[in-house]
Image (cartoon, rainbow, N blue to C red):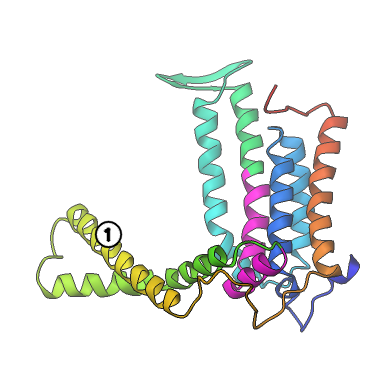
């Protein structure tokens, strides 16, 4: 497991892990953290994750830029829970449907930490995933149907074209004089045009893939072998260990609050 923590090629540690292992680690950790809503388990998991992030091989700039949406979503979620969550104990503020109490504040803190504990590792793991490597892993390691995997891969490859299509549509509409006024109306019309364009491109791509026998009911061969080795098992074990440690700590401190209770 220590081999996982040694950066390879200078700063590319996380890149060498099989995408299936990243998916498994994120799912295991998330499954452990959604079992209870308490601040102890979330804070323990988050603390361990922040230590492991130091060995992921990501630059500080890339880490903060890619995880920025999570840092924005977490406090917004906490504010909503603080205002409208289940109230208990002393009430500090009350206005219409909003009520801030000791219970809602504790729940808000637990939610804030939990969003970070689940969201940050997911982002860190998946910003280093190449779609082709992920498809290779899903087909060769998990043995998912090749037709489904290749279709999903083609869809992922087309996502990058959305922004280019959006800019082209915006410039074209402005050139025709229909994109200068009515921002909401313009966005709705442009979004519908992008949807039509995407459906057309998807249909053409599906026809081209069928013509090249991508949907043939045969056993496929793969250009690159997807290997699931010791480094990959180590990452899955780390995800399970962090989640288990958070659960055990929460139970021992009496803070465990099972969501089904």
Q: Which residue is rendered at x = 72% and y = 79% of the image? A: 225
Dominant secondary structure of the residues highlighted in magenta in the image: helix
Q: Is residue 243 left or right of residue 199?
A: right
Q: Is residue 163 left or right of residue 108?
A: left
Q: Which residue is rendered at x = 68% and y = 38% of the image? A: 34
The quarter in which the N terminus is drawn is bottom right
Q: Is residue 97 left or right of residue 253?
A: left
Residue 179, horizontal then vertical, whole percent: 15, 65
Q: Quadrant of residue 260?
A: top right
- Looking at this view, is 233 or 205 the one in front? 205
Q: Is residue 120 magenta?
A: yes
Region of the chain picked out in magenta, as a range? 115-141
The quarter in which the C terminus is drawn is top right
Residue designated by label 1: 191
Compared with 185, 15 (above or below) is below
- Looking at this view, is 123 or 135 the one in front? 135
Residue 256, horizontal then vertical, whole percent: 77, 29
Q: Which residue is rendered at x = 21% and y = 52% of the image? A: 184
Q: Quadrant of residue 245?
A: top right
Q: Give the farthest residue toward the left.
A: 177
């Amino acid at each position: 497991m220590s081999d996982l923590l040694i950066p390879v090629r200078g700063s590319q540690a996380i890149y060498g892990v099989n995408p299936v292992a990243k998916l498994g680690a994120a799912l295991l950790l998330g499954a452990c953290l959604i079992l209870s809503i308490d601040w102890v388990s979330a804070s323990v998991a988050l603390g361990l994750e922040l230590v492991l992030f130091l060995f992921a091989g990501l630059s500080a700039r890339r880490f903060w830029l890619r995880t920025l949406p999570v840092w924005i979503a977490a406090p917004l979620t906490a504010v909503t829970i603080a205002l409208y969550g289940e109230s208990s104990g002393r009430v500090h503020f009350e206005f219409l449907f909003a009520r801030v109490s000791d219970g809602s504040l504790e729940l808000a803190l637990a939610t804030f930490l939990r969003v970070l504990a689940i969201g940050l590792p997911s982002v860190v793991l998946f910003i280093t995933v190449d779609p082709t490597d992920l498809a290779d892993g899903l087909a060769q390691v998990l043995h998912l149907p090749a037709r489904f995997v290749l279709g999903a891969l083609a869809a992922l490859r087309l996502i990058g074209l959305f922004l280019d299509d959006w800019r082209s549509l915006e410039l074209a509409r402005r050139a025709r004089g229909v994109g200068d006024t009515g921002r909401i109306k313009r966005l709705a019309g442009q979004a519908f045009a992008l949807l039509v364009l995407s459906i057309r491109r998807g249909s053409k791509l599906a026809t081209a893939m069928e013509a090249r026998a991508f949907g043939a009911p045969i056993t496929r061969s793969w250009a690159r072998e997807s290997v699931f080795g010791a480094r990959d098992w180590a990452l899955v074990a780390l995800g399970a260990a962090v989640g288990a440690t958070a659960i055990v700590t929460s139970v021992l401190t009496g803070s465990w609050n099972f969501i089904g209770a």
